[in-house]
Structure formats: structure tokens, C-alpha cells
């Protein structure tokens, strides 16, 4: 049972354009969401997070949107740069549990073309 | 400051053997989590430890065990290895007072079971 889904395994975007990565979840108990980026041979690196009390969080070129009614979140990268090419994972957790047991999606491989 | 360090980085075992993976969290971090990432999938939660106590356990068989030491480092043990245990094992630490709930990941230990 995949509670966090990233239905697009890959995405190609031209440098300077917007990258939109999507993530859907099924568990209504999830109230905290994060995005991680992973380069080959490295561990995942935290990008941005959002709590369910918000519908948007912005950090530089990265913005995460949360639509609780649709159980959907998205990561926008503007403008996209070649160095953004990596695998992106969304993760969710019921934060109030006290256990940071994050459920990860299967990832979306982003390729930014120069 | 050193990040999360894991050892060994790569190892090969045969079915039925036992393996111990080690993790040192970021200095000052008292929470350590272990994740398994199988090729093509997102990281899957195995354990979380905080102050040497188990705080959470994922859906893994009893062949998987872990512990945390007084210096907050941690070991993950897997007994009676199966071919399906081949994966990247990620350790992550988290500090108190981290508002984002961010986990800091190490580069992982890649286990191959033959």
C-alpha cells in the first residue's frame, strides 16, 4: 500500500523554466511534508518542508504547495538550473506522533537541460 | 562540522550471513533513524532511536535490530541475510529544536547479498 505516490518517474525541463514535481498521499493523518533531493552516491538532502496548517511555503527558488482536500502537494523550482538535476523525493509524516517516521514516495528524476 | 557518517560504505555478504552497519550522528543530535532504500524505490523507515530508546519501528522482520549507544552513535544489525536485503541503508539524525523536522542523512551503506 503506497501511501505516498510520485506518479511521474522522470521529468525533463529546459534551463530557466519552471519545474513542477507532484506528490499525492492517501493517509489523512499525515500533517507534515518534506521534499528531499538526492544525487547519485550521496544521501538525500533536505530541501523544504510544509506543515498542514499552511498551504504554501517558499524558500528561494523552491516553493511547496499543499492542497489538503486533494491530498496533493507539489514542488515548484523557478528558475530551473542544471545543478537541480537529481532525484526528488517527497515524504510525509504524522508529526504529532513524536516519531519522525517519514513515508517516502518513489521519487521523480528531474533533468534540467542546458 | 562533520555530517552524519556511516560505515562501511560498501559491503558484500552471502545469504545467511549477518551484517552490522554503523552510524555516527551530527554532533549534538540525539535522534537517529535508519532507512532502507531498494533500487528504484524511496527510503523505507526501519527504526528510530532517541536517547538510546527505540521510538519507532517500521514493518521489518525481527532479523533487523538496532541500538543506540551513550554517545548517540547507532548500529543496525541484520541477521540471516536474504537476497532481498540488498539495498542502500541510510542513517539520519535530527537535532532537538529543529523546527523543520529535517532529517540529516548520511551517504549510506550499500549492502549486496549474493
Image (cartoon, coloured by chain):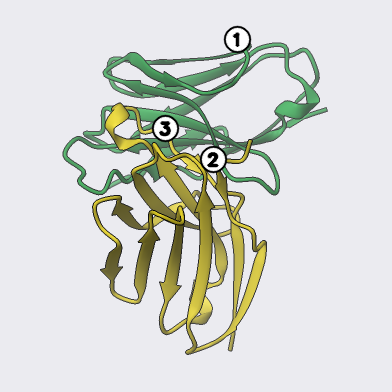
Q: Residue at x 44, y 67 (%)?
A: A75
Q: Nearer the viewer, mark 3 or mark 1?
A: 3
Q: Is residue A70 above or below residue B68?
A: below
Residues at marks 3 and 1 touching, judged by CB atoms closer than 8 Å: no
Q: Is residue A40 above or below residue B80?
A: below
Q: Nearer the viewer, mark 2 or mark 3?
A: 3
Q: Residue at x 67, y 61 (%)?
A: A9
Is B114 situated left or right of B76 in this image?
right
The kind of secondary structure element at disc 1 is loop
Residues at marks 2 and 3 touching, judged by CB atoms closer than 8 Å: no
Query: Callout 2: 10 Å neighbours few (<14), some, many (20+)?
Result: many
**Outermost residue, front side:** A69
Q: Quadrant of residue A8?
A: bottom right
For the C terminus of chain A, give its image quadrant.
bottom right
Query: Callout 3: 10 Å neighbours few (<14), some, many (20+)?
Result: many
Q: Is residue A19 above or below residue A86?
A: below
Which of the numbered marks, if any, corresponds to residue A95?
none
Q: Residue at x 41, y 37 (%)?
A: B92
The kind of secondary structure element at disc 2 is loop
Q: Residue at x 47, y 89 (%)?
A: A16
Asked whether the residues under marks 3 and 1 belong to the same chain, the reply is no
Q: Chain of mark 2?
A: B
Q: Chain of mark 3?
A: A
Quickly name the residue at label 3. A101
Quickly name the residue at label 2. B108
Chain the render paints green = B
Is A98 situated left or right of B38 in this image?
left
Q: Quadrant of residue A59?
A: bottom left
- Residue A70 drawn at (x, y percent): 46, 56
Quickly name the residue at label 1. B62
Chain A: its colour in the image is yellow
Amino acid at each position: 500500500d503506497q501511501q505516498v505516490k510520485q506518479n511521474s518517474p522522470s521529468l525533463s525541463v529546459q534551463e530557466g523554466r519552471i519545474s513542477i514535481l507532484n506528490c499525492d498521499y492517501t493517509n489523512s493523518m499525515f500533517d507534515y511534508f518534506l521534499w528531499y533531493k538526492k544525487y547519485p552516491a550521496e544521501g538525500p538532502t533536505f530541501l523544504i518542508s510544509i506543515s498542514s496548517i499552511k498551504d504554501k511555503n517558499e524558500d528561494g527558488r523552491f516553493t511547496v504547495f499543499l492542497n489538503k482536500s486533494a491530498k496533493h502537494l507539489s514542488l515548484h523550482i523557478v528558475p530551473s538550473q542544471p545543478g537541480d538535476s537529481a532525484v526528488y523525493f517527497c515524504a510525509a509524516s504524522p508529526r504529532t506522533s513524536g516519531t519522525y517516521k517519514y513515508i517516502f514516495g518513489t521519487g521523480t528524476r528531474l533533468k534540467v537541460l542546458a | 562540522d562533520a555530517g552524519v557518517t556511516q560505515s562501511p560504505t560498501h559491503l558484500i555478504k552471502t545469504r545467511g550471513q549477518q551484517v552490522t552497519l554503523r552510524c555516527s550522528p551530527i554532533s549534538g543530535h540525539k535522534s537517529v533513524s535508519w532507512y532502507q532504500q531498494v533500487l528504484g524505490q524511496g527510503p523505507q523507515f526501519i527504526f528510530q532511536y532517541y536517547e538510546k530508546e527505540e521510538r519507532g519501528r517500521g514493518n521489518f522482520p525481527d532479523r533487523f535490530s538496532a541500538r543506540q549507544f551513550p554517545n548517540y552513535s547507532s548500529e543496525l544489525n541484520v541477521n540471516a541475510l536474504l537476497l532481498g536485503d540488498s539495498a542502500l541503508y541510510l542513517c539520519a539524525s535530527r537535532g532537538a529544536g529543529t523546527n523543520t523536522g529535517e532529517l540529516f542523512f548520511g551517504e549510506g551503506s550499500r549492502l549486496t547479498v549474493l
